[in-house]
Amino acid sequence: MTLTPFPLDAAQLERGLFDDRRRRNREYLMSLREDALLQNHYLEAGIGSQDWHLQPSKDSSAARGLERQWGWETPGAQLRGHFLGHWMSAAAREIAVTGDAALRAKLDIVLDGLERCQRENGGEWVWAIPPSFLRRLEDGLAVWAPQYNMHKTLMGLVDVHRDLGDERALVMATQASQALLRWVRRFDDEAFQRILQVETGGMLEVWADLLEATGDPVYEELLDRYYRRSLFEGLLDGRDVLTNMHANTTIPEALGAARAYEVTGETRWRRIVEAYWDWAVTRRGTFCTGGQTSGEIWTPPFAFAARRGDKTQEHCAVYNMIRLADILLRWTGDLTYADYIERNLYNGILAQQDPRTGMVAYFLPLAAGERKQWGTPTEDFWCCHGTLVQAHTRHAGLSFYSGDDGTVTIAQFIAARGRLMIGDEQVDVRVTPIDDAAYVGPDSNAGPAGDLHRPSALRIRLTVSSATPRRIRVRIPEWCSAAPMTSGALPSEIEGGALVMAHDGGGQRRIDIALPWELRTVPIPDEPDTVAFLEGPVVLAGLVDHEVALRGETASAPDLLRADDERHWSQWRSRYRTVGQPRSIRFRPLHEVTDEQYAVYFPITRNR
């Protein structure tokens, strides 16, 4: 079964954890000044600050220059200008999903400025870096990833066109691509393959996007030129070409191959994507969080113990691997990809966003006693800063899918609502996590697994309106410890890793679903007596300042924790402490940890 996500404006979050994080992200998108976002593009185009759209801020931060952008966006930095593309992509998605008029007005000002820069540069060059960076790249001189940087601006323009139908953005992107097309045509294949060894970002993906948007065969030519033989042919030959490679140099190329397959239909592109996933995930394993990188590098297969440190799990890699999992979910309908997404949403995307400020942690430390290091609103602008603002505009789009047979699939248990036109009929779906106050109680459909009303279960209320009979497919997550239990009027059966319900048509139907879970441990693959504790998909962090061994038996390690107070819980119990240990350690969800020192892995030593 192939799946199609609901249209962007047909799936919205409702109030809850993920919407809180989205709102924090939206506040940040709005807080950045248009002239600061454009500062490096203006400078490259020779537009003086006296001509910028906004006058200098009178805000108290202006005295320190914090209304401008620094870090990687400092004028003169070699990646200057990269963040604007991320910002445009994030703004476009947020506007498309929510209809945010204020953010749309801000985006229009940014597009006005970018269009002016392109005009001042002669009608093509739209970037914040000079053409000389490409000359340095071709001559093998030191320069920091100009194609990676340039891709971000093209990505932003393409996303504004695709998500919002903005033709001006498409014109700017196609005009800008002419300069790159002439540059690429200067090299024979061997010379250009050498150039491709320096990070290109998602250039392959944007060429596929522009081919789809325009039908212009020059983008098919560019797709072929950006085919990175050393990576793709190694994957197709069945070799591990990822171990110890820079992870987020290669993940965007796999995403590009996926888009190339979707646009051209050429099966070689799909085989590359499938081989990439096989080597990146299936044959490699993951940390307990779902991530697989350390120091931006692919960890060797199932060899994670020595790679725990203060720079584990780069946010960019988490975000882009979620995107890749979503593509494979859509191609196959296999809900194990949704399991991967869920684990990384909680323990990557949420865990690496400060819930107070909305800022990002470039890495997620997995060594005991470390702290997350948060970015700042205007003084860092790392690559992960860019993927952060995009990630939190996409949660609703991961929730609902329609199948080619009209089946509606619920892939994530996020508070959200969706509506979909299937033929002339509108189907409405709503997912609501429920707590004790909202609980109705079990009925004859509760089944043999026991009482639906139990603390150790994720409970959701699913409301579906459909005029005609329809199948509703709900993912049974990999952490589910027993058969799902239901309370409501819809008959159900388990099929292909999903709870499938038959809506009989004729109006609204409601069903409460309990997905039982047990507190469980996940060992680090190459050190099986060192474990992490998980509640459903959520990794629990122990608040410690150094590595602490727990006394007990590995097989019964979940018994070493006890919930603090089982009377107060909603979606997850979430608060635990150790029992029977020399010292008491408190545990809380990793995605709630802010400035505390913590550990997620604990050696288990047998009692003597």
Image (cartoon, rainbow, N blue to C red):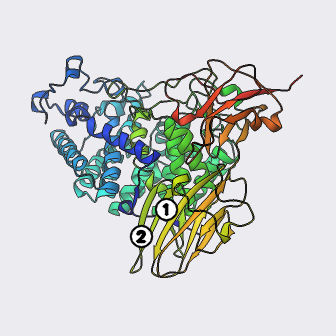
Does dot 2 land on a helix, a strand or a loop?
A: strand
Q: Is residue 442 above or below residue 161?
A: below
* Left or right: residue 48 compared with residue 523: left
Mark toward the start of the polypeptide (1 vs 2)? 1
Does dot 1 land on a helix, a strand or a loop?
A: strand
Task: Give, as a three-letter code, the residue at label 2.
Answer: Leu
Disc 1: CA contacts within 10 A as few (<14), some (14-19) or many (>=20): many
Q: Is residue 558 above or below residue 206?
A: above
Q: Is residue 557 above or below residue 375?
A: below
- Where is mark 2, residue-wise? 420
- Where is mark 1, residue-wise? 400
Rendered-image quadrant of the N terminus: bottom right
Disc 2: CA contacts within 10 A as few (<14), some (14-19) or many (>=20): many
Q: Answer yes or no: is residue 345 visible.
A: yes
Rendered-image quadrant of the C terminus: top right
* Left or right: residue 516 compared with residue 259: right
Nearest the camera: 375 or 572?
572
Instruction: State the image coordinates of residue 428 (x, y, percent, origin top left).
Output: 43, 69
Which residue is drawn at the image coordinates 67% and 71% (left, top)?
444
Task: Give, as a three-letter code, the residue at label 1.
Answer: Phe
Contact? badges 1 and 2 (CB < 8 Å)? yes
Nearest the camera: 429 or 296?
429
Q: Answer yes or no: is residue 269 visible.
A: no
